[in-house]
Amino acid sequence: MQSPMQAPDDFDPRPGKPVALSPLVRRIVAPNPSPMTYRGTNTYLLGATEVAVIDPGPRDARHMEAILAALAPGQRISHIFVTHAHLDHSPLARDLSEATGAPVLAYGDAFAGRSAAMQALAATGEIGGGEGVDATFVPDILLADGAEVSGPDWTLEALWTPGHYGNHLSFRLGDEIFSGDLVMGWASSLVSPPDGDLTDFMASCERLATLPARRFHPGHGAPVATPAERLAFLLSHRRARESAILDALSDGPATAAALAARIYTDTDPRLLPAATRNVLAHLIDLTGRSRVSPVGDLTLDARFARRS
């Protein structure tokens, strides 16, 4: 969902073409552009000999061929890292693993990392969600928060950063962070319960704000050259949405869909369903903080009332 602080229009990479971002990092954009993925999913290759791949992307033979073709003589793929189990990030991991023998590393399967609140909501089956989930994703190696994995010329630290997705990892390489879909420059992230959790999203952004970082490499769009500024914007943007929701509820109870239509007046109509999911995430977070309450059961179509 696009924000006022979106990437410049000149970010228009050619899908399948490796682009060197540093002596150690290359990016290949998958051929899956859309309103939700911008120009496509960013796949990253790290290393000079034993190459780590971050986010192989969607199951697409053209992208698979591009990744393998990017290997120079003497290079091999040794590790495959996945930030999270969405269909635009994880499905090609298994195919790439079978082709190269490299293990797939991630926080957990498609349903790992959910908070207790999200697990309870998922169990009811009443709030929808599940958009774009790679439900069959299972890694070969589980990475706990703070785990480090190294090659001859790189070391990645896994940072568990749930919010956009429960099993979402970011990866720190020195003063650079591969931020997946938690932090992007072109748009703010979709947070769709129960896979996404706004309470966790805010905590993860606040955590990354404490880390010294020169650059973020996101799952979509151009590198984020000013991480601290971008994180400050994302946090203030969510707090402004919260205030707008509370102000709207001062006029009486309303559903997430009604609130989204009222608040997201400048949003592409194609993205209004995603806006509704974001509003629902806010309402669930506000419910947990006793700022609002559902009128009856907490369901997709529930009306919410502001608490005094």
Image: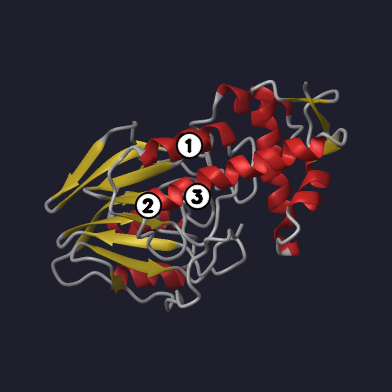
Q: In this orientation, which residue lies closer to the viewer: 205 or 122? A: 205
Q: CA distance from mark 3 to mark 1?
A: 18 Å
Residue displayed at 74% across by 35% down: 246
Please report whichever mark, 1 or 2, sits nearer to the chain's N-terminal start. 1
Q: In this orientation, which residue lies closer to the viewer: 105 or 157? A: 157
- Identify the image quadrant of residue 62: bottom left
Question: Which residue does the numbered mark 1 point to in the structure image?
Answer: 162
Q: Circle 1 sits in a helix, a strand or a loop, which is it?
A: loop
Q: CA distance from mark 1 to mark 2?
A: 18 Å
Tell me where residue 17 appears, x and y as whole percent: 36, 76
Indicate the amino acid at tag 1. Answer: Pro
For disc 3, the neighbor class at 10 Å (few under 14, some 14 to 19, many from 20) is: some
For disc 2, the neighbor class at 10 Å (few under 14, some 14 to 19, many from 20) is: many
- Comparing labels 1 and 2, the label whose residue is closer to the camera: 2
Note whether residue 128 is visible.
Answer: no
In the displayed structure, would residue 230 be above or below residue 145? below
Q: CA distance from mark 2 to mark 3?
A: 10 Å
Note whether residue 48 is visible.
Answer: yes
Tell me where residue 83 appears, x and y as whole percent: 41, 47
Question: Which residue does the numbered mark 3 point to in the structure image?
Answer: 233
Q: Quarter of the image containing the C terminus?
A: top right
Residue displayed at 36% across by 72% down: 66
Q: Quarter of the image containing the N terminus?
A: bottom right
Relative to 50, 7 lies left or right: right
Relative to 7, 130 lies left or right: right
Q: In this orientation, which residue lies closer to the viewer: 115 or 283? A: 283
Question: Which residue does the numbered mark 2 point to in the structure image?
Answer: 227
Q: In this orientation, which residue lies closer to the viewer: 58 or 33? A: 33
Please report whichever mark, 3 or 1, sits nearer to the chain's N-terminal start. 1
